[in-house]
Amino acid sequence: MRRNYIGLAGIAALAIFAFSGCAGATKLTNVWTDPQFQTNSIKKVMILGVAKSSGIRRTFEDSFVAALQAEGMGAVSSYSLTGDGPVDSVKVHAAITQSGCDGVIVTRMTDKKTVDTYYAPTTSYVGAPGAYYGGWYGYYSMGYAYTSSPGYTVQNEVVNLETNLYRVADAKLVWSALSESWLEQSGNPGGEIKPFVNQLVASLSSSKVVTRGK
């Protein structure tokens, strides 16, 4: 069964791209490559980030393009040719023809949930004058020798993304990666984009989909 990348692109107006918090922990949970794929058979790819925020989409696509170009692969951001907002099949086809891309990489969110992590109270010894058995003052001072911090809860978003590479000629899926990111609800918006992109490009390289200098 052939998978149509245009169908993924068409839901851009409905999805919320994951990167909304500061840099957290991101990992690729599963990577698949078509066993019949020939290394470097795709020369130039269009990057399409499914995002409700045009700013996040631009940052993601530009970061991905730069990382791929550093590996010697041709790449172009979709927004630079289709503009911001929802992307339909007509816009995508026109952009592919205009840019000469023979591959399309689409990243979209598959799941998002909020997780509360509780950190228990901690006690630490900070030192005090006098020994524990050195009379009443030694005993008294020990009351100040230990300090405690109250327990607290940190709220994080756990976001799952899917990134697929499709060959334009037959719309066939040739590479796919699932990822999971833990994002804190504060800090630099979009701060996880670059580390995430670097992991994707490293995986593309180790999967022999992209080879440096080719």
Image (cartoon, rainbow, N blue to C red):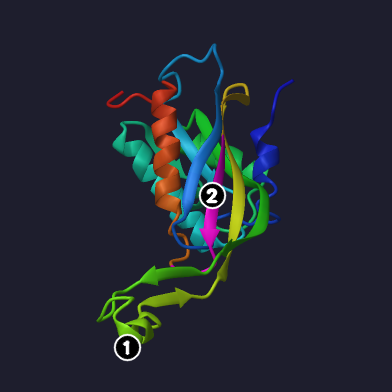
Callout 1 environment at 10 Å: few (<14), some (14 to 19), or many (20+)? some
Q: Which residue lies furthest to the top in this view?
A: 36
At mark 2, the secondary structure is strand
Seen from the viewer's position, the closer of residues 50 and 182 is 182
Q: For residue 91, which quarter of the picture? A: top right
Give residue 124's position: percent from left, percent from top. Answer: 39, 69
Q: Distance between the residues labelled 1 and 2?
A: 52 Å
Q: Residue furthest right?
A: 1
Give residue 96's position: percent from left, percent from top. Answer: 53, 36
Magenta span contains residue 40: no
Kindly identify which numbered label has been placed on residue 181. 2
Instruction: Please give the name of the residue rendered at 35% of the width and 78% of the height, measured from the top-left corner.
Output: 145
Callout 2 environment at 10 Å: few (<14), some (14 to 19), or many (20+)? many
At mark 1, the secondary structure is helix
Give residue 98's position: percent from left, percent from top. Answer: 48, 39
Image quarter where the N terminus lies is top right
Q: Image height check: is 91 above or below 54?
A: above
Query: Which residue, given by chain and number where applicable, does mark 1 sit on?
Result: 137
Seen from the viewer's position, the closer of residues 144 and 202 is 144
Query: What type is the residue that disc 2 sits on?
Result: Ser
User: Nearer the observer, disc 1 or disc 2?
Assistant: 1
Q: Image height check: is 209 above or below 109?
A: above
Instruction: Please give the name of the residue rendered at 43% of the width and 44% of the height, measured from the top-left corner.
Output: 197
Q: Mark yes or no: residue 86 visible.
A: yes
Seen from the viewer's position, the closer of residues 170 and 91 is 170
Image quarter where the C terminus lies is top left
Kindly identify which numbered label has been placed on residue 155. none
Magenta residues, start to end: 178-187
